[in-house]
Each structure stands twice: as structure tokens, then as C-alpha cells.
Amino acid sequence: MGLAVVHGVIHKLNGHIHIESVEGQGTCVNLLLPRKPARSQQR
């Protein structure tokens, strides 16, 4: 998937993407998604 597709899916799910890149060390990508409520709390 392209980054644009990932960005669209994550934001549609009310999440965020955090990317850090350090030259010579690499890149760290964090995909942050909200927790889904437990079944007993869903109604």
C-alpha cells in the first residue's frame, strides 16, 4: 500500500500516524488507533 492509502485508512478510523526519521539510523513509523470498547460496553 502507498502511504496515501495508509493515511486515509488510519484517519478514517480516527487514528494518527507518527513518523520519525534519523539519517543514518532509519525510520520509525507508529500507527495509533483508538481502542475498541469491550463487547459488554457496546450497545
Image (cartoon, grey):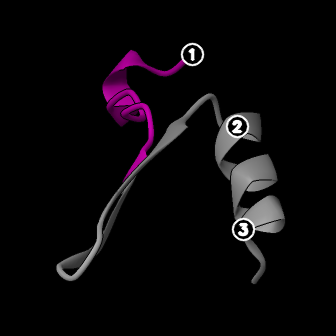
Q: Which mark is residue 31?
A: none
Q: Earlier in the sequence, mark 2 or mark 3?
A: 3
User: Is the residue marked by circle 2 packed among few (<14), some (14-19), or many (20+) residues within 10 Å?
Assistant: few
Q: Residue furthest left?
A: 25
Spatial CA distance of label 1 from label 2 is 24 Å
Q: Amino acid at mark 3?
A: Leu
Residue 38, located in which quarter of the rendered image? top left
Q: Earlier in the sequence, mark 1 or mark 2?
A: 2
- Identify residue for label 3: 3
Residue at the spot 70% in from the left edge and 37% down from the top edge:
11
Residue contact between numbered discs 2 and 3, judged by CB atoms under 8 Å: no
Range covered by the magenta-colored residues: 31-43
Spatial CA distance of label 3 from label 1 is 34 Å
- Identify residue for label 1: 43
x then y, percent, for residue 36:
42, 35
- Identify residue for label 2: 11
User: Is the residue marked by circle 1 packed among few (<14), some (14-19), or many (20+) residues within 10 Å?
Assistant: few
Q: Earlier in the sequence, mark 3 or mark 1?
A: 3
x then y, percent, for residue 6:
70, 63
Between residue 24 and residue 34, name the one nearer to us.
24
Residue 30, located in which quarter of the rendered image? bottom left
Q: Is residue 41 magenta?
A: yes
Residue at the spot 17% in from the left edge and 79% down from the top edge:
25
Spatial CA distance of label 2 from label 3 is 12 Å
